[in-house]
């Protein structure tokens, strides 16, 4: 029987041990080739250090020299329960865009907190972003317990601080686990140095996560990514984000409003199926020819998303150059990309403390959160992020740079 695969992101403040944890997970699950371990030992010796499991993921020499993770990397391992894809996300605030990129690909998260330092700026910011990206499956790992003598009192103090902040951003940890990634305590096996802890190891906590199933029972949503001309067929391709597509189904394309019927479903190097469900990448042909381009969304006629030129959203600003009210940008929402203007910055919030900085502001600064009203040049098809994430999650683009990520909460 084929195992499930779950992708999870590891986040946390810089130098709290994320990359070391990944190296330990690979080592303890025997997913690390002998030659890779030899390379890690050689690199560690050259830098005059003990074995650095972080080097397994820190591929760039700059990262090895500075001891920070710059890019978002992926690797794989497995347990008896399932296969895993690990997404290692940077902790340093200058690499926050990469962290968001990593987390947006994940189905669950591990939040790593240093037992000595406790909750820090990036701990809080990353926790907020996990909630904003809809990652509700979360386990907290209190790392470097060896540096605090494996003391239960210190663990309880840090765990209490973490839980309090998570509650403030509407998150709850499934487990809070005391570990030492460097020494392997409570990573794959229970720690003899922390007999007071009765809960799961980090691996057992991972195995308790559930692989999400795409909502096949919801209304049909098929954002069109591209249009191919094959022989006499005009094939509209994309991924079914919710619901299902069936041959003979009536569909409406939004925001244009064109209506037709699905003539066939096309799959590469496969016989044409009669039905495709959420999560499948397909092509469709239509009975009544329509001029459909990238950015349209095929929907079932009985239940349609909103079509509007005014979007109210929660946004995380990621550019050193502040956002100015009335500034013109581009919004990328699903496969839609439209010129847009920020018409209101209702509230600015500090992303690490969640304190309100200003109401009805004229600008938004780097690493701040805001409630924005955005007016698009032409209407867009939108949905609540919590119903159909692909139609409720977007980025803002200035020039050639992504400067913000946001969600439409309702």
Image: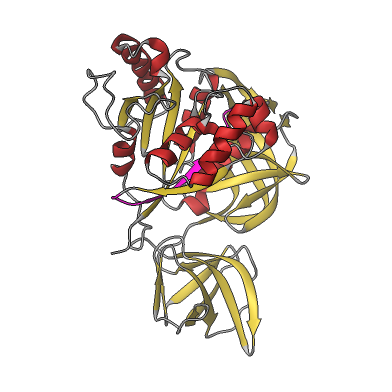
Which segment is the magenta one? Answer: 80-91
- Quadrant of the snapshot with the C terminus: top left
* Residue 79 drawn at (x, y percent): 33, 48
* Residue 229 drawn at (x, y percent): 65, 82
Residue 56 lies within the magenta run: no
Determine whether 337 is above or below 165 in the image: below
Determine whether 162 is above or below 8 in the image: above
The residue lying at 44 percent from left, 77 percent from top is 250
Q: How is the image coloured?
A: secondary structure
The residue lying at 47 percent from left, 65 percent from top is 240
Please indicate whether residue 228 sits to the left or right of residue 240 in the image.
right
Question: Can residue 301 be seen?
Answer: yes
Determine whether 268 is above or below 147 in the image: below
269 or 149, nearer to the observer: 149
Q: Residue furthest bottom?
A: 232
90 or 286, nearer to the observer: 90
* Residue 389 drawn at (x, y percent): 47, 50
Name the quadrant containing residue 256: bottom right
22 or 206, nearer to the observer: 22
Please indicate whether residue 399 sits to the left or right of residue 147 in the image.
right
Residue 86 lies within the magenta run: yes
The residue lying at 63 percent from left, 37 percent from top is 97
Question: Can residue 367 be seen?
Answer: no
145 or 261, nearer to the observer: 145
Please indicate whether residue 231 sits to the left or right of residue 27 in the image.
right
- Quadrant of the snapshot with the N terminus: bottom left
């Amino acid at each position: 029987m084929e195992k499930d695969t779950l992708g999870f992101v590891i986040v946390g403040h810089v130098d709290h041990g994320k990359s070391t944890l990944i190296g330990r997970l690979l080592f303890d699950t025997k997913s690390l080739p002998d030659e890779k371990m030899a390379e890690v030992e050689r690199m560690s010796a050259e830098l005059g250090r003990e074995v650095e499991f972080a080097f397994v993921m820190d591929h760039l020499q700059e990262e090895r020299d500075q001891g920070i993770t710059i890019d978002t990397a992926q690797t794989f391992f497995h347990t008896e329960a399932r296969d895993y894809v690990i997404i290692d996300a940077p902790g340093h605030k200058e690499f926050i865009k990469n962290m968001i990129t990593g987390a947006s690909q994940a189905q669950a998260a591990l939040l790593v907190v240093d037992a000595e330092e406790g909750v820090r700026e990036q701990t809080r910011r990353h926790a907020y972003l996990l909630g904003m990206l809809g990652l509700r499956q979360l386990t907290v790992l209190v790392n470097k317990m060896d540096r605090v003598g494996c003391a239960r009192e210190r663990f309880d103090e840090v765990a209490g601080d973490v839980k309090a902040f998570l509650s403030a951003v509407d998150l709850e940890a499934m487990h809070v686990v005391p570990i030492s990634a460097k020494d392997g305590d409570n990573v794959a096996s229970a720690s003899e140095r922390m007999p007071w802890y009765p809960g799961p190891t980090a691996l057992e906590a991972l195995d308790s996560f559930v692989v999400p199933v795409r909502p096949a029972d919801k209304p049909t949503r098929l954002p069109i990514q591209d249009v191919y001309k094959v022989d006499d067929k005009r094939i509209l391709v994309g991924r079914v984000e919710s619901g299902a597509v069936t041959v003979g189904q009536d569909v409406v394309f939004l925001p244009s409003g064109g209506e037709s019927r699905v003539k066939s479903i096309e799959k590469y190097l496969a016989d044409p199926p009669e039905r495709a469900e959420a999560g499948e990448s397909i092509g469709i042909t239509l009975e009544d020819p329509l001029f459909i381009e990238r950015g349209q969304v095929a929907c079932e006629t009985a239940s349609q998303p909103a079509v509007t030129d005014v979007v109210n959203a929660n946004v995380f600003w990621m550019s050193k150059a502040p956002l100015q009210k009335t500034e013109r940008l581009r919004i990328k929402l699903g496969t839609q990309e439209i010129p847009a203007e920020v018409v209101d910055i209702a509230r600015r919030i500090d992303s690490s403390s969640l304190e309100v900085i200003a109401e009805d502001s004229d600008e938004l600064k780097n690493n701040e959160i805001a409630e924005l009203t955005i007016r698009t040049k032409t209407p867009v098809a939108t949905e609540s992020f919590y119903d159909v994430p692909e139609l409720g999650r977007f980025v803002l683009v200035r020039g050639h740079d992504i400067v913000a990520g946001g969600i439409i909460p309702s």
